[in-house]
Image (cartoon, helix red, strand yellow):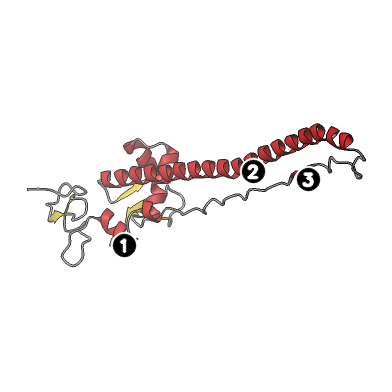
Amino acid sequence: MSTCETHPTEAATGACARCGRFVCHQCDRGEAGRIACPVCAALRRRGGSARASAGQGPRAGSGAVMVVAPRALAPNPFPPKPPSTRAQRLAWLPISGAIWALMLAASASLAAVLVAIPLGAASIYGGVRLWRRHVREVLEQRALKFFRALTADQVTKDEAVKDHGLDPGQADQVLTWLVGQELLVPDWEELDRPVIYRRQRG
């Protein structure tokens, strides 16, 4: 006969319809004939897994490309009054062409920089979002693994560190996440002893 995974001494009354874990009559949180373990029932009440409600950050904006007219970078290379002879006018052409070429090159470089800045910022922001989502998923998996391994109806931070191999920082994160998911309830009544986290009774 199968036994409850949370209470090994209790006979299982069925398996969770979502994850397949065996539960006893104390752990069954199902409704309308569907058997559900405490973890899946709590996630269903909150509308699904926490990763579905992970914070949605703002969308990265796109930068506008500034088009700089060559005349805005330097004064007109032509003199105020044109030369009086054809030879004098032709003598200005090489100088004017060189100046215009330099200004066009500068404008193209500036436009490339203005395009690269927002693209680089968007890439950095996207990488940060992926990293944060990965951290949230790792925390969720660690917290659910810890919760399913609990054999008692209550636990303290020291027990989480000693019996479950978590460091103090991880224990704080896991217990805080489980409280946020309404799987554990902190007992703050006695301030002269460590906080006791009790299983939420549905």
Spatial separation of the CA atoms under disc 3 and disc 1: 65 Å
> Hey, what amino acid is under mark 3?
Arg
> Hey, what amino acid is under mark 2?
Leu
Which secondary structure lies at badge 3? Answer: helix
Mark in front: 2 vs 1:
2
Please state which of residues 169 and 163 is positioned toward the viewer in this rendering. 169
Is the residue 36 above or below the residue 148 in the image? below
Mark in front: 3 vs 2:
3
Sequence order check, earlier mark of 3 and 1: 1
Please state which of residues 89 and 151 is positioned toward the viewer in this rendering. 89
Instruction: Say which residue label 3 marks.
Output: 71
Please state which of residues 165 and 21 is positioned toward the viewer in this rendering. 21
Instruction: Say which residue label 2 marks.
Output: 114
Please state which of residues 52 and 97 is positioned toward the viewer in this rendering. 97
Task: Please report the residue visible at 16 percent of the width from the left and 58 percent of the height from the top.
Answer: 25
Is the residue 26 above or below the residue 65 in the image? below
